[in-house]
Image (cartoon, helix red, strand yellow):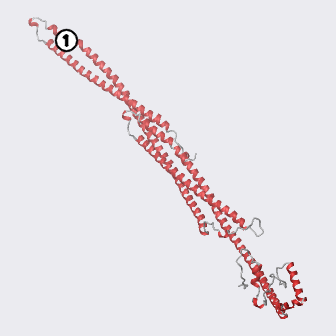
Amino acid sequence: MELTATYARPKTSNFLPAISTMASSYRNTKPASALNHSANQWRTSSYYKTSDTIPNLSSVQRGSLDLLRANTMFYPSNRSTLTSRYTPDEWFRSNQSNYRESEASRNSAERLRRDTLRLIQDKEQLTRRTQENSSKNIGERLNDIAFWRSELSHEIDNMVTEIAALAEVKRRLERALAETERPLQVSQECLYHREKRMSIDLVHDDVEKDLIKEVEVIKSCQERMRRHLERAAAQLASNRAAQHELERDLSDKVTAQRIDDRCHHLRNTSDGISFYRGVERLDPSVSLPESWSKFTDDNLLCSQSQRAASHKLRDEIEILLNAASGEMWSQFNNVNVAFTSRVAETADARNSLQAHLAKTLQEIFQTEMLIESLKKALRDKERPLKVAQTRLEERTRRPNVELCRDNPHHRLVSEVREIEDTVHKLQERLLEAESSLQCLVKTKVSLEHDLSVKANSLFLDQEKCMSMRKTFPSMPRLVGYT
């Protein structure tokens, strides 16, 4: 523990007290009655020396005083004034008092000098240590800033990489979504064309079911892609916001590091140093060391959280792209298989109809020939019937007893009846043949209509639909690579 003398320090605006104040502080003064024997008092004129003469007198006043003393000494009329002079004892005591006061002043000044030198040395060491500690603290602060700046730079680089990766996945998802428009249009056009099927072929077959399912699959994939696109856009905004906070924090730390580095290199001999009165009473700070480090740590944690969410979203988008492309390709193949099977069934039905139509046409031809034969047979029976009836009619003209019911008569009657029965049967058979011909014609018309229906269905399925479905986006296109 240092032992230093304590001195009263006047309350003045200057760093050092006035000389008169210091003199009064260090002199050992005596009571005024010990030195005053008359109205005149003895005082020192300054801090460092005493004077025999009256202080602060001009040269004129000193001349007048000497003349007064001379008159007092040499004129007898003034001898009575000698009684007011000091005695030798008083003169001796005055000298002794001056000696003691001088010695006391010197001792006090010497003590003050020693204490002041020691104080200067102590304060110089204290100032130097304080300045070193301040420089050390600023250096530690620079290390802290450098550490957080490195962490921020590393996190910003990671975030920039993540933003680029997410943006690329988002572009792939947009391309994949655009690629689904053409297959969806093809499926809808296939359904539209198949609505033009006619008659019995307008059925809710497997092709139509698979086409409807394909439209649903593509729309479902599109909806999921749109939702993930919205999430990707929101995540990109969050990532850029986190990046902005990191960059702003990094910019602030760069500025703070530059300022603290300049302060750390300031010395007593540096240029640009100056007095800023009252600056130590200002406190413009907005954070404490704990809140300062927590602010950056929170920014880093927020950025890391956003990066983790972004990475998870990218994985989900990759899974979605692969799953959607697989679903669409699988359903596309199912529809194509259904189309192929339906086209084969329709072609078989058409071939069967054509065969039946050919047979029907042949049968119609033969039936027409049969009808002609029946008509000819009926015509052929007219003359024999006429002959038999004419014979009977002629024999009715036989006279008297000659009009006999003889065997020729019986035979002619039988002949007429046989011919009439034959004609009747032939007419019935002709009606049947004509009815059969009408049925065959109706069958022919139906077969021809069915053939036209099948031909139309084959044209729609094979020429219209299958020709549109020859191309489908490849897997790389469906996942957005090209």
As drawn, 402 above or below 288: above
Label 1: element kind: helix
Instruction: Report if residue 331 is visible in the image.
Output: yes
- Residue 215 is situated, as x and y percent measured from the top left of the image, at 45, 43
- In screen coordinates, is 330 left or right of 354? right
Which residue occupies 18% across, 15% down? Answer: 416
Which residue occupies 91% across, 88% down? Answer: 74
Among all residues in the image, which is located at the extreme right? 74
| Amino acid on which the number 1 mark rests in the picture | Ala
As drawn, 26 above or below 138: below
Callout 1: few (<14), some (14-19), or many (20+) C-alpha neighbours within 10 Å? some
Number of numbered discs present? 1
- Which picture quadrant has residue 443? top left
As drawn, 302 above or below 478: below
Q: Which residue is mark 1?
A: 388
Instruction: Report if residue 343 is visible in the image.
Output: no
- Residue 471 is situated, as x and y percent measured from the top left of the image, at 52, 40
Front-most of residues 301 and 258: 258
Front-most of residues 330 and 169: 169
